[in-house]
Image (cartoon, rainbow, N blue to C red):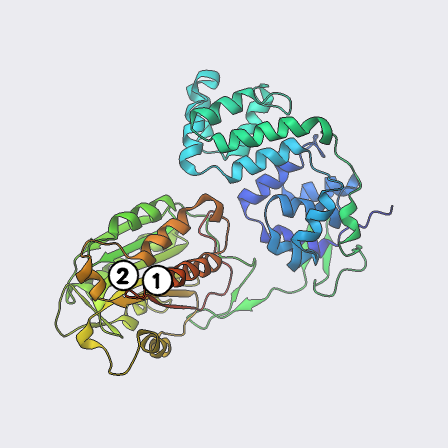
């Protein structure tokens, strides 16, 4: 069978789509294929695989599938998840051991990883434990392989650690690997039958959807012919570069929580802290204090070093305004909240994603006659400023919900916190998570006719947004 090599433009595009954590995973998965490359960067890895005739659409499909980047299968390689699964059932390139380690890594949250690192103390000493805190799971596994604590044929230490941190679900994956190891084998097959379903790509004939690039200084450096641009709030053109927002700072950004009801602040603060945000919580503000606090937060110097901003507001209100802790006019227009953080007012946030989550309890006396909450929210759409890099997610429910159960949390906000912090969803784009949130809220509405949440989701994001390090 002829191996079809991959155009440099395709490899460049894939490189730009992968964050640093995914690049490390890629190197780990390929370690058995190119064992003589110590900690290679992506381009070096591409070249090494190419020299061994292993860099094909087939191998790229298997790598992307293993890293759960199903979006890139379609967008870059022109195939789908089911096609890859069908072919993997017949043949595979990656060793089951490395696939297993990558799968375990995807299912460990920060608390699990911290506990795992602590358990290394008896075997590695305090000096290594301190260094390990700066590494991800696969980086630690690489180190444990060097001292033969972990290997394809020696997983007892890892299994015991997972049992100690109460991850029996992951121990079951190790047991399954051991059962199947005899029939699957660990030697990689260099020709993968995925090739049947993937497009036949060549260095001289890239697909029409990919712009051709030039190789500079040999095959290691790639120059794109053109870089797409996007127009942010200021109207100044900015290079878009990759297809997702940079999310590398620690903390990721400020998360401002203004809870004028008092039922949701704890779960929200915990969730966004877990997402590596610096949380600023202000309960029970009145209308007069609100703009002063918004202005104060917008002027924080930290924004220039952070990659994102989040604002959560919980309040009673009318259709377009919020009352904060006041129950009488004047109220504060919701549309003004985000104007404090747009690029022209807060230049440190220019080009960075700004996310707003609002739970509003509408007072009955402020309802429009013969109107519904859904219709009112529809009118609000036009009032939201049309500037770039903003996401607005809003839930509205009758304030009678608070009268019936004064201490009950917002279903919308509690579900948001749950979805954002679920390990299995950490790698999903934020918009996908919010669609799941909307689905759950509307499912609840069917079972609770007396308490109907209406939702508004609107955004002017220019790229994909992942609330994890990229």
Q: Is residue 251 above or below residue 153?
A: below
> Which is nearer the N-term, disc 2 or disc 1?
2
**For the residues bearing labels 2 and 1, Cβ distance under 8 angstroms:** yes
Dot 1: few (<14), some (14–19), or many (≥20) neighbours within 10 Å?
Answer: many
Q: Kindly identify the residue that appears in the image at 74 percent across and 34 percent down.
A: 188
Dot 2: few (<14), some (14–19), or many (≥20) neighbours within 10 Å?
Answer: many
Camera-nearest residue between 13 and 74: 74
Residue 161: x percent and y percent? 47, 24
Q: Kindly identify the residue that appears in the image at 64 percent across and 52 percent down.
A: 14
Residue 138 appears in the picture as rendered: yes
Camera-nearest residue between 375 and 289: 375
Q: Secondary structure at mark 2?
A: strand
- Relative horizontal placement of residue 420, taking residue 75 as reference (left or right): left
Residue placed under numbered mark 2 in the picture: 313
Query: In the drawing, what numbered circle is on residue 356?
Result: 1
- Relative horizontal placement of residue 129, taking residue 225 as reference (left or right): left
Q: Kindly identify the residue that appears in the image at 53 percent across and 20 percent down.
A: 157
Q: Quadrant of residue 454?
A: bottom left
Q: Quadrant of residue 259?
A: bottom left
Residue 3: x percent and y percent? 83, 47
Q: Is residue 211 above or below residue 249?
A: below
Distance from label 2 to label 1 (Cα)? 8 Å
Residue 269: x percent and y percent? 29, 48
Residue 219 appears in the picture as rendered: no
Camera-nearest residue between 381 and 202: 381
Residue 148: x percent and y percent? 59, 19
């Amino acid at each position: 069978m002829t191996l079809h090599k991959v155009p440099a433009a395709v490899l460049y595009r894939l490189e730009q789509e992968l964050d640093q954590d995914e690049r490390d995973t890629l190197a780990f998965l390929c370690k058995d294929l190119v064992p003589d490359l110590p900690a290679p960067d992506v381009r070096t890895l591409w070249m090494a695989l190419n020299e061994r005739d292993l860099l094909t659409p087939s191998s790229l499909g298997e790598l992307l599938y293993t890293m759960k980047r199903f979006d890139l299968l379609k967008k870059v390689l022109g195939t789908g998840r089911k096609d890859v699964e069908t072919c993997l059932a017949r043949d595979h390139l990656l060793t089951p051991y490395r696939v297993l380690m990558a799968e375990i890594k995807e299912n460990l949250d920060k608390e699990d990883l911290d506990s795992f690192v602590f358990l290394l103390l008896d075997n590695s000493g305090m000096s290594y434990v301190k260094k390990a805190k700066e590494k991800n799971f696969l980086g630690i596994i690489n180190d444990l392989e060097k001292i033969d604590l972990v290997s394809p044929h020696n997983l007892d230490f890892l299994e015991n650690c997972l049992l100690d941190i109460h991850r029996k679900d992951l121990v079951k994956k190790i047991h399954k690997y051991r059962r199947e190891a005899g029939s699957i084998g660990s030697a990689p097959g260099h020709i993968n039958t995925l090739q049947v379903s993937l497009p036949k790509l060549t260095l001289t004939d890239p697909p029409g959807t990919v712009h051709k690039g030039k190789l500079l200084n040999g095959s290691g450096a790639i120059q794109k012919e053109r870089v797409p641009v996007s127009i942010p709030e200021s109207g100044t053109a900015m290079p878009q570069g990759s297809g997702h927002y940079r999310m590398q700072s620690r903390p990721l950004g400020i998360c401002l929580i203004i809870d004028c009801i008092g039922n949701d602040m704890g779960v929200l603060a915990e969730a966004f802290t877990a997402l590596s945000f610096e949380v600023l919580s202000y309960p029970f503000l009145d209308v007069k204090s609100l703009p002063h606090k918004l202005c104060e937060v917008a002027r924080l110097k930290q924004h220039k070093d952070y990659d994102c901003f989040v604002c959560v507001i919980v309040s009673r209100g009318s259709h377009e305004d919020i009352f904060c802790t006041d129950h009488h006019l004047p109220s504060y227009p919701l549309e003004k909240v985000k104007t404090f953080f747009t690029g022209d007012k807060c230049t440190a946030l220019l080009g960075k994603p700004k996310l707003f989550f609002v739970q509003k309890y509408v007072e009955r006396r402020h309802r429009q006659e013969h109107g519904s909450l859904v219709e009112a929210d529809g009118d609000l759409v036009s009032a939201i400023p049309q500037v770039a890099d903003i996401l607005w997610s809003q839930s509205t429910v009758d304030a009678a919900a608070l009268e019936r159960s004064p201490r009950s949390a917002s279903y919308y906000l509690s579900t948001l916190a749950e979805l954002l912090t679920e390990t299995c969803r950490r790698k999903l784009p934020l918009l996908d998570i919010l669609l799941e949130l909307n689905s759950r809220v509307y499912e609840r509405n069917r079972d609770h006719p007396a308490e109907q949440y209406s939702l508004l989701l609107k955004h002017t994001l220019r790229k994909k947004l992942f609330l994890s390090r990229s």
